[in-house]
Amino acid sequence: MLFFPKGVMNGEVVDPSKLSQDFVEPNRVVSNTSHYQWANDTFDQRVNLESGTHINVINKTVAARLQISNSADPIVGRGGGTPNANLHQIKLDRGLQEVGDGDIRAEWVAEDPELVMICYSMQYYMPGQTVVNDLFSPASGVLTGTFRVRFQSAIQIDGNNILGTGPLGIENSIAGIRGTGFAHTSLGVSGTTIQYLEAGAHFATVVANLGRPDKTITGVDATTNNLAALYDYFRDKDGKSFKGFVIGNRNLIVMRFARGGLLGG
C-alpha cells in the first residue's frame, strides 16, 4: 500500500499516458485504505509515525554455556565439572518436547489477523560416539557396532509442529529411520517459518527429541533377530543414563505484521 511517484526522468520526453500513472496509482491506493493503514491521533501523536510501530517483535533468549575449552570437553552433566543450570537435557525417544520447559516460549494475543515470521537458533551437543555405543550395547556383548541417536527439532505454533524448521523427518518403519534427524556430535541448528494466523491468542516455541537409533550390527542374537525387540531395550532400560545430551544457548524471535486485508479481516 505504498506509492512512490516516478515523474519524468532528466532528458526524458514527456509521455502523457505514463505521467498520468503518477495520479491514477495514488488515487487507487488512497481509495483502498482501511483501519489497518490508520491509527487514532496519528498527526497529534507523532510517536505513531516512528519506524517500526507497525511491527511487534518478541525476543526470547536463554544463555546456557557448554564451558568448552581447548583442553577440555564441554561440561554437560556427564563426567566432571558442574554443568550450567540452564542446559536442557534431552530424553531418548519421548517425542518432541518443549525445549527448556518453555523458557523460550513466546505468547501473544493478536487483535487482527497477522503475518508472522518465527526464527530460532540453538546449540545441540551429545557426549561422543563412544558414549553412545556404550549406552546401547547390551552387557552380553551380543550386539556390537555403531549406534547413532538422532537429534530432532522443530518450531511449534499453537501445538502444531512445523515440518521443515529443523532436522526432523517422518519415520515409516523400524528400518526407515535414516534421514529422520541429526546423528553426529554437535550442531548449531536454526529454522524459520512464515505463517498467516487468525486474530486471537497464540504461542510459538521450539521442541526437540532424541530419535531412536539406527544400528550397524556386526552381530545379532539369533534367537531374537528382531529390531523391535532391540528397540525396547534401548529405551532407557536397565538404568541407562542419557545425561549429557543437551541443548545449550537458545533463542526464539517472533515478528508480527498485521495483515487483515489479505485475510479478509
Image (spheres, rainbow, N blue to C red):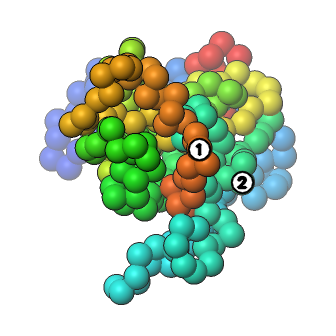
Q: Considering the numbered disc 2 on the image, is that residue within a helix, a strand or a loop?
A: loop
Please provide percent x and percent y for residue 160: 62, 24
Please provide percent x and percent y for residue 152: 46, 39
Q: Give whichever of 155, 187 is nearer the camera.
A: 187
Q: Give whichever of 12, 37 is nearer the camera.
A: 37
Does the rendering let one see residue 90? no
Vertical relation: 219 (above or below) 247: above
Q: Give whichever of 37, 106 is nearer the camera.
A: 106
Please provide percent x and percent y for residue 131: 40, 58
Camera-side mark, 1 or 2: 1
Give the residue type that dot 2 points to: Asp
How far apart are the two marked residues, 1 and 2, measured between alpha carbons?
31 Å
Q: Give whichever of 207, 34 is nearer the camera.
A: 207
Taking the image as shown, residue 199 lies to the left or right of residue 175, namely right
Does the rendering let one see residue 199? yes
Q: Residues within 10 Å of mark 2 (few under 14, many from 20)?
A: some
* The C terminus - image quarter: top right
The single residue placed furthest to the bottom in the displayed view is 71
Which residue is identified by label 1?
238
Q: Compare marks 1 and 2 and give the one earlier in the sequence.
A: 2
Q: Quadrant of residue 7?
A: top left
| Residue appearing at x 84%, y 46% in the figure | 41
| Residue appearing at x 79%, y 26% in the figure | 200
Taking the image as shown, residue 255 lies to the left or right of residue 132, namely right
Residue 38 — which label?
A: none
Which residue is identified by label 2?
103
Vertical relation: 247 (above or below) 143: below
Give the residue type that dot 1 points to: Asp
Taking the image as shown, residue 185 lies to the left or right of residue 250, namely left
